[in-house]
């Protein structure tokens, strides 16, 4: 048997994950079968099982890949201006919610949140996924306090958790079919930021 190149294996793995995400977003974790993923991907059962032992492993792999996607959004438009950096992150997340691919990823993320209540591996992934943006925002707020842009009385961790919770709430509303426009959400976010900024 000829050896399969690592690049080809990585491409196949990504194809399987994308097919699984489409199925999970459409039918949910528990209604989706491996046969559904095989049909969606157009790959053989042997190929699927060559990468993943079953549905549980696929769910966990989707959780890991979601972190990479969110990391890319968090890295958008870095700026020396802390408030501008926070706005850039907000715009990236809100813009992602207006795209079908972004909404599909969030549909799966919502199921991961629920799955985290029964699966310790998924819970660790979800918690890690929340801690990353919180740590980034805490760092930005502390930098802002050092530079004099953010009120020194602001508690960075509490403010960061409130920001993340705000976006989680917007995600839920979008998934329920509510219209959440980027300009409206950015206006609300700017009001929140104004409360953190030093008043001149």
Image (cartoon, rainbow, N blue to C red):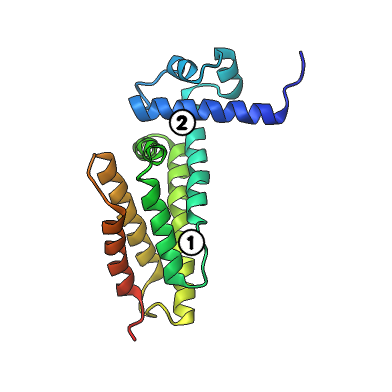
In percent of the image, x 76 and y 13: which residue is there? 1
Left or right: residue 16 versus residue 154 is: right
Q: Residue at x 42, y 70 (%)?
A: 83
Taking 144 as reference, is 58 above or below it? above
Which residue is farthest left?
178
Q: Secondary structure at mark 2?
A: helix
Determine the secondary structure under disc 1.
Answer: helix
Mark positioned earlier in the residue sequence (2 or 1): 2
Q: Could you say where residue 131 lies in the image, as x and y percent from the top left?
A: 45, 54
Q: Quadrant of residue 98?
A: top left
Q: Position of residue 27 (x, y in %)?
A: 34, 24
Mark 2, other Cα within 10 Å: few <14 / some 14–19 / many ≥20: many
Residue 29's disc number: none
The residue wearing badge 2 is: 59
Residue sitting at 47 percent across and 25 percent down? 19
Q: Which residue in the structure is indicated by mark 1?
A: 136
């Amino acid at each position: 048997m000829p050896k399969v190149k690592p690049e080809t294996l990585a491409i196949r793995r990504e194809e399987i994950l994308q097919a699984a995400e489409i199925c999970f977003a459409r039918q949910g974790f528990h209604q989706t079968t491996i046969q559904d993923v095989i049909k969606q991907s157009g790959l053989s059962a042997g190929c699927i099982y060559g990468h993943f032992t079953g549905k549980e492993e696929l769910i966990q792999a989707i959780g890991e890949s979601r972190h990479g996607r969110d990391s890319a959004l968090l890295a958008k438009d870095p700026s020396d201006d802390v408030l501008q950096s926070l706005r850039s992150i907000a715009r990236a997340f809100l813009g992602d919610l207006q795209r079908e691919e972004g909404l599909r990823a969030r549909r799966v993320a919502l199921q991961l949140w629920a799955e985290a209540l029964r699966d310790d591996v998924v819970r660790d992934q979800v918690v890690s996924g929340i801690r990353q943006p919180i740590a980034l925002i805490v760092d930005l707020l502390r930098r802002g306090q050092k530079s004099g842009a953010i009120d020194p009385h602001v508690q960075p961790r509490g403010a960061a958790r409130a920001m993340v919770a705000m976006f989680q709430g917007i995600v839920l509303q979008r998934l329920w079919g509510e219209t959440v426009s980027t300009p409206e959400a950015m206006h609300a976010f700017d009001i929140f930021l104004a409360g953190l900024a030093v008043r001149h």
